[in-house]
Amino acid sequence: MIDDNPTLQIREDRLAKFDPEERAKLIRIAGHVRAMLEELGLDLTDPNLLETDIRVAQMYREMFHGLQEGAEPKVTVFPNDEGYTSMVMEKQIPFFSMCSHHLVPFYGHAHIAYIPTDRIIGLSKLPRILEFYAKRPQLQERLTEQVVTYLESKLQPLGAMVVIEARHLCVEMRGVKKAGAVTVTSAIRGSFLEKAVREEFLDLLRRN
């Protein structure tokens, strides 16, 4: 941030809620964004662009917050005291992420299932796990694998399966420009490799 910038005080007010280290980081990011906008020839005195650099910096902080939380989500698991041995499935979990190739969004829904042994996880934690891995520069294939690998490592279930359906703005806005194209990825572990178990998953997925 340059000292003679006429909007400096406005921006400092916007960042007042952050601690000094985080504020300094956001100001550095905003400086890079501003330099990019200048290179593109944009008029940064336009009222609509006056604080775009700070807004983008704050947006990236929000979109990439998974990077700040450590290597994996902090999620509590519980003993399976009821001895439940059938499939647990949560479907149509919405998410947003950013493509690591172009830093534009991809978004959609995830369907997550596992068959427990002696451990279970709260249903609200499945979206939490997805959110953790989505909030970073990401690939859909990697995201799918990370979620299922986390479930496998923390729960040691009989099996786990994750399917993600997403639209990628790097496909829709640029390149081939195929609006509405949906990418589907899956990751399968343990008993879900068996045809009958996979078919149960897909049957539950098709139900309204």
Image (cartoon, rainbow, N blue to C red):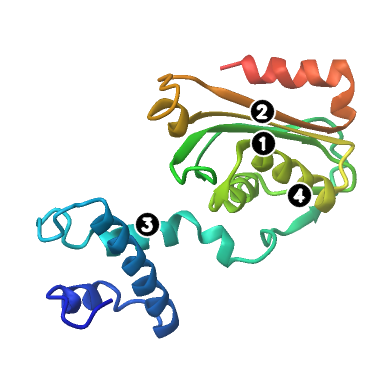
**In the displayed structure, does residue 26 sit left or right of residue 155?**
left
Type of amino acid under label 3: Met
The local secondary structure at tag 4 comes to: helix
Q: Earlier in the sequence, mark 4 or mark 3?
A: 3
The image shows residue 203 at horizontal and vertical percentages of 70, 15
Q: Earlier in the sequence, mark 1 or mark 3?
A: 3
Kindly report the distance in space between the C-alpha atoms of the residues bearing marks 4 and 2: 17 Å
The local secondary structure at tag 2 comes to: strand
On the image, numbered disc 4 is attached to which residue? 150
Residue found 37% across the figure and 57% down from its top: 59
128 relative to 195, above or below: below
On the image, numbered disc 2 is attached to which residue? 185
Type of amino acid under label 1: Glu
Assess disc 2: are there few (<14), some (14-19) or many (≥20) residues with their C-alpha within 10 Å of its C-alpha. some
On the image, numbered disc 3 is attached to which residue? 59
**Looking at the rendered structure, which numbered label has been put on residue 141?**
1
Residue found 38% across the figure and 29% down from its top: 173
Q: Quadrant of the C terminus?
A: top right
- Can residue 62 be seen in the rendering of this structure? yes
Assess disc 1: are there few (<14), some (14-19) or many (≥20) residues with their C-alpha within 10 Å of its C-alpha. some
